[in-house]
Amino acid sequence: MFADPMIDLRADPRRAAALAGELRREIGRKHPLVGARWTVVAEAASQDEVLAVAGDQVVLVHLTWSGKKESPPWPQSVALPDHEALLQLIADRY
């Protein structure tokens, strides 16, 4: 379960896959997220942000919707070390 406005996508694999595809398109060679296989698990549609996981890493990523590789720091991302960090970021950002 995710705090509002995050929408849980674990039961919507089509939407999660579409967002993961955009994330892959945007991550350039020098981006800190390059090289990992990210799975999108939630989105905040109104903010163009997704919550993605790879192994034990969790990040909140602001997609640009350019459909192409971006130059760092885009797409902007914030690493989240634990659930409390996610809740605090949601409270601060939304």
Image (cartoon, rainbow, N blue to C red):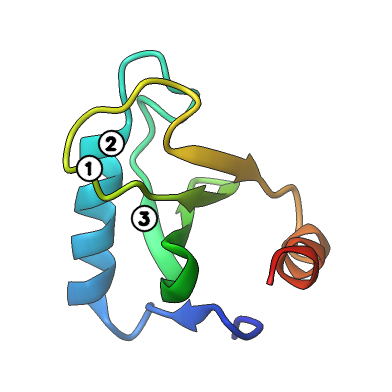
In whole angstroms, how far apart are the C-alphas of marks 2 and 3?
A: 14 Å
User: Residue 91: x percent and y percent?
Assistant: 79, 72
Q: Quadrant of residue 17?
A: bottom left
Tell me whether circle 1 and circle 2 mark residues in contact (CB < 8 Å): yes
Question: As shown in the figure, which amino acid type bears the numbered disc 2?
Answer: Glu
Tell me which label, 1 or 2, sits earlier in the chain.
Answer: 2
Q: Which residue is mark 2?
A: 26
Residue sitting nearer the eye, 22 or 35: 22
User: Which residue is drawn at the image coordinates 68% and 72% (left, top)?
Assistant: 94
Q: Quadrant of residue 11?
A: bottom left
Type of amino acid under label 3: Thr
The secondary structure type at the circle numbered 3 is: strand
| Residue 23 vertical placement versus 44 (above, below) | above
Element under disc 1:
loop
In the image, is residue 9 above or below residue 74? below
Can you identify the residue that label 3 sits on? 39
Q: Is residue 18 left or right of residue 53?
A: left
Residue under the image location 38 percent in, 26 percent down: 34
Q: CB under 8 Å between callouts 2 and 3?
A: no
Question: Pointer 1: what residue?
Answer: 66
